[in-house]
Amino acid sequence: MSSSASDSAKPTPAYMGWSTFGTFIGHLQEMGEALPDQVTKSVMSKVAFNVQGQLRGTLTFLGLTLGDDHRVTDKLRALTAQHGTSGWAAAVKANIVPAYESAIGDLNLEKATPEAVQRAFRAQFAAAGSTLDKAIRFMLFALETAAIPLSPLLAPGKRKSSGSAARRRSKKKPKGKDAEHPEEEKETPPGFLDFPIHIPGHPSGKLRLPEGLTEDDLALVDAYMAVVKAHIKRATETGSDAD
């Protein structure tokens, strides 16, 4: 196996949905020669707001963009040019698969088990829990798209998670006062910030926002909160009318 990277140097792997990623690449292809030199917010306008942070992390991890200003690389242009064509598989193999060489380069993927892939990912990348599951799924879809032979145990459409979902299903539901403050999710996905919300008499919740928001972005957050307030107000008024 390849030597493990130090914890401080481990990169965060791509963990967004493969289909969402492909849709974005297709959107870039539609731009043709007008594809910008940077992936800015306007370029990601068709991507859900809460996914844009994951998309930027994915592009950076795969080497499709560079720097804090997210400059477009030749790899991204080459990948975009082949989207939806007979050359798509070869483009994915050439421009996406190499990002995983440090983790899976020594694995025989035709015989590898999900546990072996998980160990390899943990050794090289900063991912755990549900983020690890999503990151491995993204890679497996990329390998499948690139026509790289995989063990039946690794088929991305059939692969089971690392067990976190099963453990969650087996937990007993809290009762009484404990129901107001259930055990909180321990892990915040890389690139996000969680703000717990505790309201007496109601189950606990949280507000999850991507890191790096600007003052302009906060104006949009305020707009979303206004929608929430309006919804609660309508629900309250409807309940009063029913009484």
Image (spheres, rainbow, N blue to C red):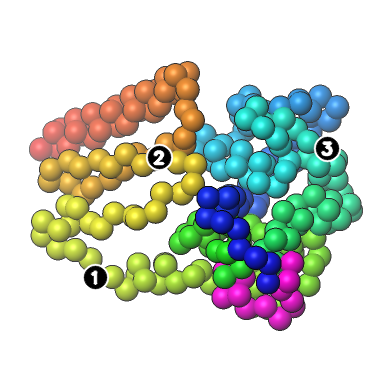
Three-letter amino acid code of the residue under disc 3 = Asp
Residue matched to label 1: 172
76, above or below 108, in the image: above
User: Few, some or many C-alpha atoms within 10 Å of disc 3 (few <14, some 14-19, many ≥20)?
Assistant: few
Please indicate, yes or no, whether residue 142 appears anywhere in the rendered image. no
Q: Position of residue 187 (x, y in %)?
A: 39, 53
Q: Quadrant of residue 169?
A: bottom left
Check if residue 88 falls in the magenta segment.
no
Q: CA distance from mark 3 to mark 2?
A: 32 Å
Q: CA distance from mark 3 to mark 1?
A: 51 Å
- Residue 237 or residue 176, whichever sits in front: 176
Check if residue 110 falls in the magenta segment.
yes
**Residue drawn at the location 67% of the way across and 42% of the way down:** 59
Mark 3 or mark 2: whose residue is earlier in sequence: 3
Question: What segment carries the magenta color?
Answer: 105-118
Residue matched to label 2: 193
> Which quarter of the figure is the C terminus placed in?
top left
Q: Is residue 182 left or right of residue 151?
A: left
Three-letter amino acid code of the residue under disc 1 = Lys
Can you tell which of label 2 and label 1 is closer to the viewer?
A: 2
Q: Position of residue 143 (x, y in %)?
A: 74, 62
Residue matched to label 3: 74
107, above or below 5, in the image: below
Q: Position of residue 8 (x, y in %)?
A: 53, 50
Mark 3 or mark 1: whose residue is earlier in sequence: 3
Q: Is residue 55 left or right of residue 64?
A: left
Please indicate, yes or no, whether residue 61 appears anywhere in the rendered image. yes
**Residue drawn at the location 45% of the way across and 41% of the way down:** 192
Residue 7's mark? none
- Residue 193 or residue 182, whichever sits in front: 193
Three-letter amino acid code of the residue under disc 2 = Leu
| Image marks 3 and 1: residues in contact by CB distance under 8 Å | no
